[in-house]
Image: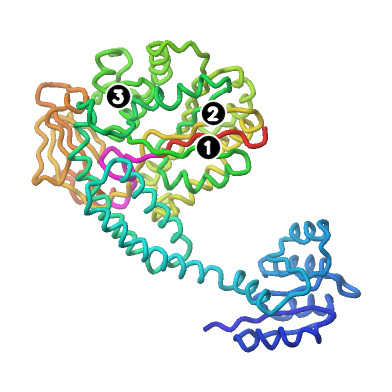
């Protein structure tokens, strides 16, 4: 066991000998001094793991010593001990980045607790997290054996994300077990989707989740009737775990009123899922009703150029006469421009902002070696998402929105999954390039380890010709062509992709927030 070294400065240090003895018996090395100047000198000459400082010492005060120690060693943990309960003293100490604050008289247990919070916190949290997950592990695994509903699957996914985030800090021995359980969960979830997805679209009597094309009508439009401006932020490709890491950053500005999930339609891509959100229609219905707005797989132009037009038509179809704006942010400068002009939006009933960065990050990680180095795993991918958000124009926009009484909705169109297993498929030149779903005629593959839609009309998917079918990758698969197999495996393995069937791609957040300080 590591032996920690502690410096304790107090002008009445002799009276604290019982406390010092108590800590020494528990394996801590204590260096006592009776004034602030000596404490500063000792910190210059030696390395300590934590410093205890009495606030009220003759000569150099504890606060003065704190300032000098932090200038020398900003990462050295310092605990302030004082008889003074004045708020000003507390604020000054906290502002100087103390790690704990204790009020005299103190007992040995208080001191021990403070030390453990500072020095052993990470280890103790990891051990407790592992123990709690072990208790939960069996419950989650047993749930897979039952016939889960779509709501129960969403709960399972949320639980797995919760434990993943809990274990993300440091080297947790149970993290590997959790990863295996996530794989098992996805295997069972994909079976669930295979059994139920088609009936969700065709059987009005069957229990089903809210899907992409129902989102606006069921969740967004009702908010327009509450006499507050509504801001709908669609962050492309934002997974539930990524939402959970940016949520704390919003806590100062917004209160989370409701946090729900909904299911993305298939394919889980921007062209299908996001167009479905804004049109309120499934893909084949979009083609029939608005052929001028639908861009097919064989066309080169962007598949999402007409989201504002789709939204306008959906609002008319629902007899909604509200004033709305639509902004799509693809570049940094576009975000900055919108942040500068956000005050102009409050006269609108609905303001839609589509932010593309997370999707761009996912694709950049595939294409750029540097991004792969920065985000080699799930935890790093989340960390980059959080870092981007904190420094993004989007956060600036949200801060300005928070100054007014509004309803804020944050959601996405689909998630993404880290792919690991190649699956061989054959197709002609007309087949689309997406690695998680294929559309075309004469698609060739062996086995049944995919989700195939031989009748696209039952999935409300457009058909380019009579023999068109769709094939969706499941779990962590990605499609690879046999003639280019090694290239695909080497280039795309461990990249983040979307378009197929997985918990991460299909179960996505819908969050309703309100201004906290307006």
The residue located at (34%, 29%) in the rendering is 212
User: Is 417 located above or below residue 409 in the figure?
Assistant: below
Q: Kindly identify which residue carries mark 2.
A: 334
The residues colored magenta run 493-508
Circle 3 packing at 10 Å, graded few (<14), some (14-19), many (20+), is few
Q: What kind of element bears circle 2?
A: helix
Circles 3, 1 touching at the beta carbon (< 8 Å): no
Element at label 3: loop
Q: How is the protein colored in the picture? A: rainbow
Tell me whether circle 2 and circle 1 mark residues in contact (CB < 8 Å).
no
Residue 498 in magenta stretch: yes
Q: Position of residue 360 (x, y in %)?
A: 42, 38
Q: Is residue 488 visible?
A: no
Q: Is residue 455 magenta?
A: no
Q: Earlier in the sequence, mark 3 or mark 2?
A: 3
Q: Residue at x 55, y 82 (%)?
A: 2
Q: Which mark is residue 300?
A: 3
Residue situated in front as seen by the camera: 237 or 72? 237
Position of the C terminus, as image quadrant, is top right
Residue mark closest to the camera, 3 vs 1: 1
Please indicate, yes or no, whether residue 232 appears anywhere in the rendered image: yes
| Sequence order check, earlier mark of 2 and 1 | 1
| Eye-nearest disc, 2 or 1 | 1
Query: Which residue lies under the disc numbered 1?
Result: 257
Q: CA distance from mark 3 to mark 2?
A: 24 Å
């Amino acid at each position: 066991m590591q032996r920690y070294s502690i410096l304790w400065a107090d002008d009445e240090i002799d009276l604290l000998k019982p406390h010092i003895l108590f800590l020494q018996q528990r394996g801590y090395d204590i260096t006592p001094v009776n004034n602030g100047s000596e404490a500063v000198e000792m910190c210059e000459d030696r390395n300590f793991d934590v410093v205890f400082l009495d606030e009220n010492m003759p000569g150099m005060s504890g606060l003065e010593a704190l300032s000098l120690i932090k200038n020398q060693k900003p990462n050295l943990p310092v605990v302030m001990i004082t008889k003074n309960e004045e708020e000003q003293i507390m604020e000054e100490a906290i502002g100087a980045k103390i790690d704990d604050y204790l009020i005299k008289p103190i007992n040995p247990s208080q001191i021990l607790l403070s030390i453990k919070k500072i020095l052993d916190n990470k280890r103790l949290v990891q051990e407790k997290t592992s123990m709690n997950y072990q208790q939960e592990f069996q419950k989650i695994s047993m749930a897979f054996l039952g016939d889960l509903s779509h709501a129960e699957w969403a709960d399972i996914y949320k639980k797995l994300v919760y434990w993943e985030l809990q274990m993300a800090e440091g080297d947790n021995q149970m993290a590997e077990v959790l990863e295996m359980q996530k794989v098992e969960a996805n295997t069972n979830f994909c079976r669930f989707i295979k059994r139920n997805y088609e009936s969700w679209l065709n059987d009005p009597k069957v229990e089903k989740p809210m899907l992409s094309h129902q989102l606006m009508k069921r969740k967004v439009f009702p908010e327009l009737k509450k006499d507050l401006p509504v801001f709908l932020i669609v962050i492309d490709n934002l997974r539930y775990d990524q939402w959970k890491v940016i949520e704390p950053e919003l806590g100062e500005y917004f209160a989370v009123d409701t946090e729900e999930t909904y299911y993305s339609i298939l394919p889980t891509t921007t062209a299908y899922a996001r167009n479905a959100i804004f049109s309120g229609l499934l893909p084949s219905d979009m083609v029939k009703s608005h052929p001028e707005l639908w861009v097919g797989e064989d066309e080169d132009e962007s598949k999402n150029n007409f989201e504002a037009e789709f939204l306008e038509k959906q609002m008319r179809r629902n007899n909604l006469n509200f004033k709305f704006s639509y902004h799509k942010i693809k570049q940094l400068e576009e975000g900055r421009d919108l942040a500068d002009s956000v005050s102009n939006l409050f006269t609108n009933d609905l303001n839609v902002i589509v932010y593309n960065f997370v999707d761009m990050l996912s694709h950049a990680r595939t294409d750029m070696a540097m991004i792969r180095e920065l985000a080699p795993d799930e935890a790093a991918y989340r960390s980059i998402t959080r870092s981007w958000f904190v420094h993004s124009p989007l956060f600036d926009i949200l801060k300005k929105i928070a100054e007014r009484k509004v309803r804020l909705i944050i959601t996405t169109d689909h998630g993404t999954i880290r792919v690991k297993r190649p699956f061989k498929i054959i197709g002609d030149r007309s087949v689309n390039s997406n690695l998680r779903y294929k559309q075309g005629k004469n698609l060739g593959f062996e086995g049944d380890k995919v989700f195939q839609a031989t009748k696209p009309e039952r999935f409300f998917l457009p058909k380019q010709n009579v023999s068109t079918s769709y094939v969706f990758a499941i779990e962590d698969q990605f499609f690879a062509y046999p003639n280019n197999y090694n290239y695909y495996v080497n280039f795309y393995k461990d990249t983040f992709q979307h378009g197929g069937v997985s918990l991460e791609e299909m179960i996505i957040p819908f969050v309703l927030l309100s201004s906290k300080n307006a």
